[in-house]
Amino acid sequence: MSQPVRLGVNIDHVATIRNARGGLHPDPVRAARQAAEAGADGITAHLREDRRHIGDKDIERLAHEIDLPLNFEMAATEEMLAIALAHKPHACCIVPEKREERTTEGGLDVAGGHLHIAPFVDRLNAAGIRVSLFIEPDPVQIAVAEAIGASVVEFHTGAYCDAYIAGDRTKTVGLLERVKTACALADERGLEVHAGHGLTYDTVKPVAAIAQVIELNIGHFLIGEAIFRGLREAVTTMRGLIVDARSEAVA
């Protein structure tokens, strides 16, 4: 019997809205509490080098005020490592980061950057923090992620979601199959499988139905939906779709 899928809610873009005006409102920690009340299994937050949304104080508060596991998304830099080691989140997901990008544009090139990334994985592991690597669904990236000691891989689902939005059915099906193949391979290698980026109500079920997927991390879409229906309802609806997809997959 397949395991249920955890839902991690990324609250970065609550902070984006707050920072557009300055001040304290809306509060991302309040959003995290509401997500928890709606059935989220964890909270994800990405502290970027330029602090464009989540800030240092947000991470401090999330670490101390929220009961759910905190997934700290971070670039592989000494500054971010020091913050992670100071707050000891449940997990750290190492992601690629460029100052000029609007959002994360793809997976981390673990294969090309393993000499740089491996020491960060080692130091986080030594501190008892679960390490996830945000990568493309690619066999080489999976193999190197395992080799350098990550316990989790999170597959970038952005290309699949973009193809769906573009209405390219053939490409959508092909990219989904690529994700499925990667999930099976990662699971065979003993890695826990997560997925995320760009997932919506329309695209989440095929990914949630993949037997090896243990966790989905979703943010921007849910915060956008919250404008129209409230965060609790947005999260509850997403949670329901994930549960339905898993139930239908094993029926």
Image (tube, grey):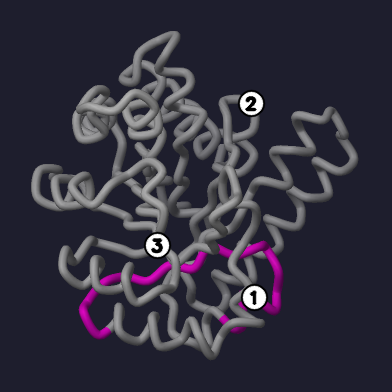
Label 1 crowding class (10 Å Cα cut-off): few <14, some 14-19, many 20+? many
* Residue labelled with disc 3: 74
Q: Residue at 68% of width from left, 56% of height from top?
A: 180
What residue occupies the far top of the structure in this picture?
228
Which amino acid, by three-letter code, is at mark 3?
Met
SS state under label 2: loop
Is residue 235 visible from the viewing direction of this image?
yes
Measure the C-alpha gap from mark 2 to mark 3.
28 Å
* Residue labelled with disc 1: 141
* Nearer mark to the viewer, of 2 and 1: 1
Measure the C-alpha gap from mark 3 to mark 1.
18 Å
* Residue labelled with disc 2: 202
Q: Residue at 35% of width from left, 37% of height from top?
A: 11
Of 80 and 66, the residue lying toward us: 80
Residue 18 x, y percent position in the rendering? 32, 27
Report the magenta residues as a range: 126-144
